[in-house]
Image: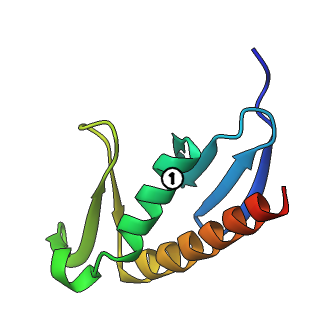
Amino acid sequence: MSRCIPKVLVQGEHFNISTCSSCKRIGFCYKNLISGFDRNDFVGFAQSIIKTPFEKFAVPFPPYGEERIVIKTCHEDIQFCFHPVEFSELKDSLQEALLLIEVESVLK
């Protein structure tokens, strides 16, 4: 079993998107939660998030009713929760990561 060696593709204040130079999986780390994907699953996840409008799916969150969007993961009991600024940054970063992954695959 080889050890993962992450290469950061995109980094934000509370998250980063990286690819492992050993196993080629893509990791999305948000605060202290990591979700791993193979390339195709990450592309599907990213495309789905990018086309999701915050306003349509936001819900008021306790204790002050601030709107947030809840994003499901592949595990039914784990979800990501983003406020509007975080979600906008996430969408921009996913778009950038998709572009970098595409460029990397073209160069190989």
49 or 77, nearer to the observer: 49
Q: Quadrant of residue 6?
A: top right
Which amino acid is tagged 1? Phe
Residue 48 in view, yes or no: yes
* Residue 16 image-quadrant placement: bottom right
Horizontal side of residue 54 vs 14, given as left or right: left
Name the spot of residue 28 as percent of width and height, x first. 56, 52
Q: Is residue 86 above or below residue 33?
A: below
Q: Can residue 10 be spotted in the picture?
A: no
The residue most toward the right is: 107
Left or right of 99 on screen, residue 64: left
Return the x and y of residue 24 as percentages of the image width and height: 71, 40
Where residue 88 sits: x, y (%)? Answer: 45, 82
Q: Which residue is mark 1?
A: 42
Q: Quadrant of the N terminus?
A: top right
Is 30 on the left or on the right of 48, as rendered? right
Front residue of 3 and 80:
3
The residue closer to the viewer here, 13 or 79, is 79
Considering the numbered disc 1 on the image, is that residue within a helix, a strand or a loop? helix
Q: Quadrant of residue 55?
A: bottom left
Query: Which residue is located at x 74 percent, y 58 percent?
Result: 105
Residue 94 against residue 29 in the figure, above or below: below
Name which residue lies at 42% across and 57% down.
45
